[in-house]
C-alpha cells in the first residue's frame, strides 16, 4: 500500500505539481514581458533588429514551406477527389485547410525552430556570461528590455508570415491542380471563392498572433532560466523548440474548438424545424 | 569612517535547491572602506556580492542597504539603489552586440537626463581613466583582450559615478602585469572619489595592495557543526598571524592537508 502510494506520488503527483508550478512561473514571466511590450520598455533599434531577424530572414523558408505544402496537398488529395468527380472542389478544400490551419501552424513551427531556438540560445548565453545581471545592475529590467521587443516582433510578424505561407501554398497547389492535373480553372477558383471566407482568413491570422506570442515567450523564458554552461545553452534551445511545438499543437486544437463555437454563436446554422 | 554600516548582512543565508552556500552571515561594511573578501572556490564569495545588489535574494536573514532591508524595496527603489552601485563582473559581462563606446554609455543612456554630448564626454573620460585610447571606442567586445575587457567593464561600472563599487575577481585570468594594472585602477578609483569598495579575490597581491579590511569565507560543506562561515574579519596585516590555521594556510597558498582531504573525498 505504502509502496503504491509512493509510486503514485513519484510518477503522478510530483510531476503534476512541478508542471503546475512551472506554468505559474512562466505566466508571471509572460505578464512581466507583456507589461514591457505595452509600456515600450525597449529600444526601437533593438525592435527593428529583431524584426529583421524574425521577419525578413524567415521569408525564404516560410515561402518554400508554404509552397511545397500546397503542392503536396494537391498531389495527395487529387486521386480521391477525381474518383468521386469533385476535382474542381480540390482548390476550396486545400485553400481552406491552408488558411485556417496549415498556414498559421506551419509558419509558427518554422519560426519556433528557426527563431525560437536562436532566441533561447542568445538569452541563455547572456545569462551564462552574466550580461543579464549586468543589465539589472545598470538599472534596466532585462525581461522588459530583451524579451519585450522579441515578443512584440513575433506578435506582429507571425501573422504576416502566415499570409505569406498561405499565399505560397495557394500558388503551389494551383500550379499542380491547373497545370499538372488540368482542372478547370473557372470552377476551381469559383469554389474557392464560395467556400473560403474572410472569417477563415481572419481566424488564421488570429492564430498567428497567439502562436507568435506563445512561442516567443517560451523561447525567452527558457533562455532566461537556463542552466549554467554550454550544456545549459544547448538544452535551452532544444527545450524552446520542443515546448513551443507542443504548445502550438495543443493551442491549435483548443483555438479550433473556440473558433468553431464562436462561429456557431455568431452565425447559427439554419434549422428548418425552427423556421 | 561612519558608525552606521552602509551595507549590512544580518544572519544572511542562501540555499540553491539542496545546497546551502551561505549561512548565518553577519557582516557590516562601512562607507568609504575597501573590503576584500577572500576564500576558496565555491565558498560563496560571488553570491555574497550579488546579495548586495539584490541580484540574489537571501533565503534566510536579510541584507540591508543604508539601514533598509532589500526585501522591502519596490522595483523602482531597488533600481535607484542599483544605479548607485557599480559592478565589475568576473568576465566583465560586456554586451556582445554593442561596441566599447556604447557599452560604457549604456548606463547613463538608460538612466536618462543627460545629453548625448555629455554622455560622450563621460565615456571618453572613463575610458581615459582606465587607460584605454579613443581608438578602442569602436571595437567590439570580441576584439578585446581579457585585460581590455576588464578595463571596459570597469569604465562602464564607473560611468554612473557610483557610491559603491563591487569587484568580482577582477584579476582572474590576467597576467601579472595586467593584474597590477587592475589593482592600481582599483586604488585610483578609491583615491579619485569617495567610494565603498568590496573586492572578491583570490589574489593576495590585490589584498595587500587594496584592502583596508579582509573577510575570509569558508565553504559551508567543510565547516564543523556550529562553526561560522566567516573565519576572519579584520585588517589585512592580521592575516598572516590569524588564530585559525585555515586562514594562514589560504594566505600562504599551501595545499598541505587540503590535498590529503581532496584525495580522501
Image (cartoon, coloured by chain):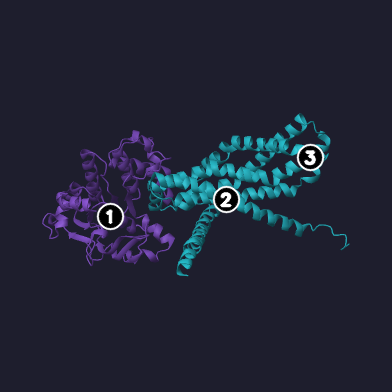
Q: Which residue is mark 1?
A: B45
The front one of A229 and B217 is A229
Q: As drawn, which residue projects farthest toward the top?
A: A179
Do tag 3 and tag 2 residues touch (Cβ < 8 Å)?
no
The subunit letter for the residue under badge 1 reads B
Using residue A61 as the reference point, say whether residue B159 is left or right of it: left
Q: How many marks?
A: 3
Q: Position of residue B72 (x, y in %)?
A: 39, 66
Q: Position of residue B235 (x, y in %)?
A: 16, 57
The first of marks 3 and 2 along the sequence is 3
Using residue A107 as the reference point, say whether residue A273 is left or right of it: right
Pick the quarter of the image with the C terminus of chain A: bottom right
Do tag 2 and tag 1 residues touch (Cβ < 8 Å)?
no
Q: Residue at position x 28%, y 55% from top?
A: B45
Using residue A235 as the reference point, say whether residue A72 is left or right of it: right
Q: Callout 1: 10 Å neighbours few (<14), some, many (20+)?
A: many
Name the mark on residue B83.
Answer: none
Q: Which of the chains is purple?
A: B
Using residue A104 as the reference point, say whether residue A44 is left or right of it: left
Single out the mark in the foreground, 1 or 3: 3
The subunit letter for the residue under badge 3 reads A
The front one of A235 and B127 is A235
Q: Which of the chains is cyan?
A: A
| Res B194 seen here | no
| Res B210 seen here | yes
For mark 3, give the secondary structure: helix
- Are the residues flagged by discs 1 and 3 from a single subunit? no
Q: Which residue is mark 3?
A: A81
Name the mark on residue A246.
Answer: 2
> Marks 3 and 2, Cα distance to the nearest angstrom?
32 Å
Q: Residue at position x 55%, y 49% from top?
A: A244
Q: Position of residue A5 (x, y in %)?
A: 48, 68
Amino acid at each position: 500500500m505504502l509502496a503504491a502510494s509512493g509510486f503514485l506520488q513519484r510518477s503522478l503527483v510530483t510531476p503534476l505539481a512541478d508542471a503546475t508550478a512551472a506554468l505559474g512561473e512562466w505566466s508571471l514571466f509572460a505578464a512581466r514581458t507583456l507589461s514591457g511590450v505595452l509600456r515600450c520598455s525597449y529600444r526601437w533599434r533593438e525592435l527593428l533588429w529583431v524584426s529583421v531577424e524574425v521577419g525578413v530572414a524567415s521569408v525564404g523558408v516560410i515561402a518554400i514551406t508554404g509552397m511545397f505544402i500546397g503542392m503536396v496537398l494537391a498531389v495527395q488529395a487529387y486521386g480521391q477527389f477525381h474518383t468521386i468527380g469533385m476535382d474542381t472542389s480540390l482548390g476550396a478544400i486545400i485553400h481552406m485547410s491552408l488558411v485556417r490551419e496549415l498556414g498559421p501552424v506551419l509558419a509558427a513551427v518554422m519560426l519556433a525552430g528557426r527563431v525560437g531556438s536562436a532566441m533561447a540560445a542568445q538569452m541563455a548565453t547572456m545569462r551564462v556570461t552574466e550580461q543579464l545581471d549586468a543589465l539589472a545592475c545598470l538599472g534596466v529590467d532585462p525581461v522588459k528590455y530583451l524579451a519585450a521587443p522579441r515578443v512584440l516582433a513575433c506578435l506582429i510578424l507571425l501573422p504576416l508570415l502566415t499570409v505569406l505561407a498561405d499565399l505560397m501554398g495557394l500558388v503551389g497547389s494551383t500550379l499542380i491542380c491547373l497545370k499538372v492535373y488540368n482542372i478547370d480553372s473557372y470552377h476551381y477558383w469559383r469554389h474557392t471563392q464560395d467556400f473560403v471566407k474572410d472569417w477563415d482568413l481572419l481566424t488564421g491570422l488570429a492564430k498567428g498572433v497567439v502562436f507568435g506570442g506563445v512561442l516567443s515567450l517560451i523561447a525567452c523564458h527558457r533562455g532566461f532560466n537556463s542552466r549554467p554552461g554550454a550544456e545549459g545553452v544547448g538544452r535551452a534551445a532544444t527545450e524552446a523548440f520542443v515546448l513551443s511545438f507542443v504548445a502550438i499543437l495543443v493551442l491549435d486544437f483548443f483555438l479550433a474548438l473556440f473558433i468553431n463555437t464562436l462561429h456557431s454563436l455568431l452565425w447559427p446554422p439554419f434549422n428548418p424545424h425552427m423556421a | 569612517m561612519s558608525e552606521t554600516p552602509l551595507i549590512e548582512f544580518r544572519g544572511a543565508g542562501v540555499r540553491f535547491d539542496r545546497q546551502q552556500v551561505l549561512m548565518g552571515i553577519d557582516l557590516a561594511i562601512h562607507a568609504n572602506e575597501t573590503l576584500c573578501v577572500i576564500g576558496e572556490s565555491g565558498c560563496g564569495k560571488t553570491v555574497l556580492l550579488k546579495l548586495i545588489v539584490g541580484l540574489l535574494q537571501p533565503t534566510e536573514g536579510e541584507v540591508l542597504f543604508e539601514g533598509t532591508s532589500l526585501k522591502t524595496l519596490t522595483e523602482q527603489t531597488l533600481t535607484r539603489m542599483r544605479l548607485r552601485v557599480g559592478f565589475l563582473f568576473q568576465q566583465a559581462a560586456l554586451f556582445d552586440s554593442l561596441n566599447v563606446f556604447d557599452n560604457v554609455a549604456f548606463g547613463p543612456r538608460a538612466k536618462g537626463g543627460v545629453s548625448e554630448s555629455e554622455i560622450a564626454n563621460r565615456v571618453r573620460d572613463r575610458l581615459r581613466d582606465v587607460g584605454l585610447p579613443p581608438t578602442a571606442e569602436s571595437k567590439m567586445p570580441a576584439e578585446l583582450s581579457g585585460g581590455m575587457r576588464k578595463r571596459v567593464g570597469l569604465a562602464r561600472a564607473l560611468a554612473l559615478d557610483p557610491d559603491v563599487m563591487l569587484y568580482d575577481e577582477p584579476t582572474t585570468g590576467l597576467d601579472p602585469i595586467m593584474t597590477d594594472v587592475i589593482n592600481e585602477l582599483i586604488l585610483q578609483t578609491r583615491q579619485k572619489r569617495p567610494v565603498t569598495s568590496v573586492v572578491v579575490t583570490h589574489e593576495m597581491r590585490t589584498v595587500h595592495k587594496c584592502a583596508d579590511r579582509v573577510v575570509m569565507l569558508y565553504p559551508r560543506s567543510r565547516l564543523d557543526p556550529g562553526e561560522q562561515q566567516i573565519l576572519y574579519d579584520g585588517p589585512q596585516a592580521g592575516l598572516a598571524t590569524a588564530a585559525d590555521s585555515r586562514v594562514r594556510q589560504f594566505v600562504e597558498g599551501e595545499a598541505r592537508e587540503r590535498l590529503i582531504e581532496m584525495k580522501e573525498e
